[in-house]
Image (tube, coloured by chain):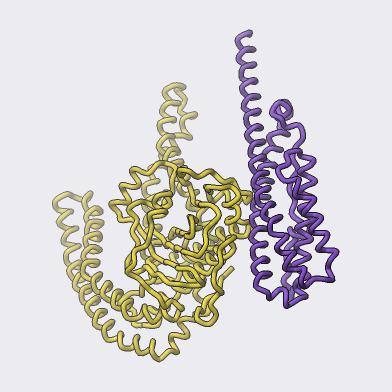
Amino acid sequence: MSASANRLWRKLSAVDRARLQDKGRRAIPLTLAIVLGSSLVGFLIFFTTGSFLLAFPFFLIGFLGNFAPFVAALGAFALLHHKFFAARGLDLWTAAEDRDHTTTKDAADDPDMAAILAGFENERTRLATEFGRGARLVRRVAIVAVPCLVVLAFIVGGATMVVPSIIAGVGVYSVFHFAATDHHQKQFRDAFKKRVLPPLLVRHGLEEIESAAPVALERAVAFNLIAPQTRTRRDDAFHYAYRGATVTIAEFNALPAERKIENDRRPRRQRVPINGLLVQIAFPGRVPATTLVGRELPRPKALVPIRLEDPEFHEIYEVWGSDQIGCRTLLTPAVMHRLLVIADETDLLPPSLLAEDGTLTVLFEKATARDMFEPGKVTDPQMMRHLRQIADDFDAVMALVDDLLDVVDQIPGVRLGPVAGDTHPMESRL
Amino acid sequence: MTVFLIVLAMAAAAVLYGWYAAIVSARNRVGEALGGIDTQLQQRHDLIPNVLAIARRFLQHETTLLEEITALRAKAQPQLGQRDFQAIADKFETETALAADMTRLFALAENYPQLTSSGPMVEAQRTYREVEASIAAARRFYNNAVNNLKTRAETFPGPLVSGLAGVRVLPPFYQAAEGAEKPVMAVDHL
């Protein structure tokens, strides 16, 4: 079921996914108001008119509203399952089966890469064995402990305590399972990335890598495109020179506690991506005007609203800029269309964008919680599958970068270098 | 009844004033957009003599076209900064003809490999493309502003207050050069 839901989700365009998300956000408070308010209205009608018949429809809605928590719990479970479990290990980029995995296929034929993977297999087997041992231990303890907990709860608290004790037992089991296995998975992930990532990046033509360099987020924060406490993942941040520009790719997220503070303080009409992908392009030349493209932004200082002609673009985005004509020079009809479709065939939403001086910062919000540039589960013996997962992420992100560089190349006064030929296997998808 | 009529009259006056203010705002936006267009067109006018100077060395047989471009530029130049809508319409027509001629010039240049491969011409062509992109952006802003003004002036009660707001004649749209709006067929260029 979740696989078909994933396929369905993948078939939607980025704009449709954004619309669906917006509809969901609007529907939740409305549904709550109807469900909670109808009983109240029913009582008011009953006491003022004395007619039960008039109040009956409202009582009925209120009665049906009793089932709402169950439906909401089911929906939340499905959503969390999709976001945190089903999406992991699945190739949510362009339909995987339709794609020619150029990089991976080449890598499979590459004796150096094959040697690296073969040399790494022993370490994976060791970590997988430890992972399995930890998981088995927790499972055996759980088989004994959870029924004991349930029986104890029944004796102490009666039948009403059975269901809560089962839920508590499952929760404790999950925590222990995570504690017993996660560090092996983390070790595998770190070692895999340390050994396999550098040659893989070279295959993508990314020769000048500075993963440790900090990513500049100050301007995006200043314009409220992202929360102030947003952090980029150090192990998933890459800088490189390409087509005459300096490109930075990084995954970003806000820490849970900080995210909560942000939620509390955030003005009502604002939408900030808390988990996503950042692409920053520093190019020779300057944009004619500071341009800010986002979804539900607070009014930025010193920028004026730009009302563009594309109704679909206007439905998804709000645009602010320092100059009406300069912004339109960047946001041509072709660029507007490109921004709307750029995240199609990925699990990302339409991006926010800040163009200022010689830098273009693009923020893609993720539609799932899936981590990018990560290998699969340590217990999966198919090393090539781990490699493909990371290579697919790079292929998709590099295609996005190519599309964005095409946009930059159209800016008057900007002179980028030629498109690399053989060194870069990906072509722009647009 | 009297109170009701007074309230009604005040409400109508408030609506009319609001509409008047909106029309004035839209008219000023059109003025701002016209200023933007003038700036971009001036850049084109400044660039044309340089392009012609480079082209003249190779395109001796195309003197008619070169002279036509010079004449159109001379005709368009004094119209910059014009705020009379009829004169603006004429200016747009001249500029459209000038743009079409410049496109023809660059197309003709394709027949002269020495010209198209010369550094200054390549640079001039690229700069011209950038100026054209800026003109297109300014045109979109202007047309958007004109559309907004027309909607406000022609929707009731706009016609009642548009004269008071100084909008007796509505500004023209700035159309792109003929053929520019048509899709480019790659096959035609292979």
| Image quarter hosting the N terminus of chain B | top right
Where B31 sits versus A52, above or below? below
Please indicate whether residue A233 sits to the left or right of residue A311 in the image: left
Q: Quick one: which chain is yellow?
A: A
| Image quarter hosting the C terminus of chain B | bottom right
Q: Residue furthest top?
A: B2
Residue A15 appears in which quarter of the rendering? Answer: bottom right
Q: Residue at x 62, y 17 (%)?
A: B10
Q: Which residue is drawn at 51% across and 76% down?
A: A97
In this rendered view, identify the residue nearer to me: A342 or A56. A342
Residue A30: where, in percent of width, then height?
46, 41
In this rendered view, identify the residue nearer to me: A116 or B65. B65
Please indicate whether residue A115 sits to the left or right of residue B181 in the image: left
Where A321 sits versus A131, above or below? above
Q: Residue at x 34, y 47 (%)?
A: A262
Residue A165: where, in percent of width, then height?
21, 55
